[in-house]
Amino acid sequence: MRITISGPPGSGTTSLARYLAEKHGLDLISAGEVFRQLAKEHGMELAEFGKFAENDPSVDRMIDARQKEIGEAAKNIIVEGRLSGRMVANADLRIWLSASLSCRARRIAGRDGMDEEGAHAYTENRQRSESTRYRNYYGIEIDDLSPYDIVLSSETFGVDALGVIVDAAIVSFTRQREGAC
């Protein structure tokens, strides 16, 4: 089974992806982790590297192409990233997580050791930067959720509840694929 999990920064995509990968024995590839590693390798903060990526399309294109290649070739994988639901053409289940900007900023502040005001500005700028890049590089409007099979609020549901919802979708998909009623 190929599952993609996408959502804006701080929406909990990585947490849900890890939960599902562990529970179902699936491999996991995360575009965000690749992006963070590249920022570190370039000696840049994440926001600074995002600006760099705006002027160097090869950064996003490399991450997206690699994610697409791995995701489409694997049989049992979760591909987590902002564009994974659009890039992995043969995905079986595409999930989008949402949460308000203030909720996501609180999470990012706690995760990255920032104050909430700084995390709010950082998250808003990052989201704007990514939206611009995706529009310019691929003609994608990131707010268009039509490619996704499931859209869930990670502000309403914690990772365990999200996992239960997605588990039900996985069971349903598996039964449908096996021809059960």
Image (cartoon, rainbow, N blue to C red):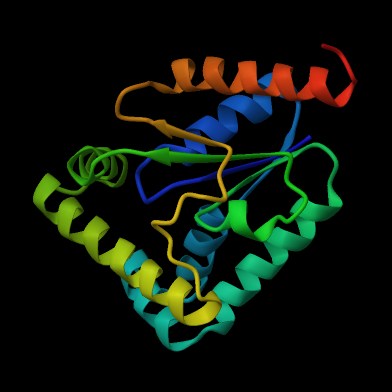
Q: In this view, does 81 lie to the left or right of 23?
A: left
Where the N terminus falls, by quadrant? Answer: top right
Q: Residue furthest front?
A: 181
Where the C terminus falls, by quadrant? Answer: top right
Residue 78 is situated, as x and y percent measured from the top left of the image, at 68, 40
Residue 99 is situated, as x and y percent measured from the top left of the image, at 30, 38
Instruction: Tell me which residue sits at (72%, 17%) in the image.
Output: 171
Instruction: Tell me which residue sits at (55%, 58%) in the image.
Output: 83
Q: Residue furthest left?
A: 117
Instruction: Tell me which residue sits at (38%, 68%) in the image.
Output: 131
Question: Foreground residue, 170 or 46?
Answer: 170
Residue 60 is situated, as x and y percent measured from the top left of the image, at 55, 73
Residue 44 visible to an observer of this rendering: no
Q: Which residue lies furthest to the right in this view?
A: 178
Residue 167 visible to an observer of this rendering: yes
Q: In this view, does 64 lie above or below 178?
A: below
Q: Which residue lies furthest to the bottom in this view?
A: 55
Q: Is residue 28 above or below residue 64?
A: above
Q: Is residue 107 left or right of residue 132?
A: left
Residue 121 is drawn in which quadrant?
Answer: bottom left
Q: Is residue 95 left or right of residue 97?
A: right
Instruction: Tell me which residue sits at (67%, 19%) in the image.
Output: 23
Question: Foreground residue, 135 or 22?
Answer: 135
Q: In this view, does 47 lie above or below 29?
A: below
Q: Is residue 117 above or below residue 162?
A: below
Q: In this view, does 45 lie to the left or right of 16?
A: left
In this rendering, the count of numbered labels is 0
Residue 167 is drawn in which quadrant?
Answer: top right
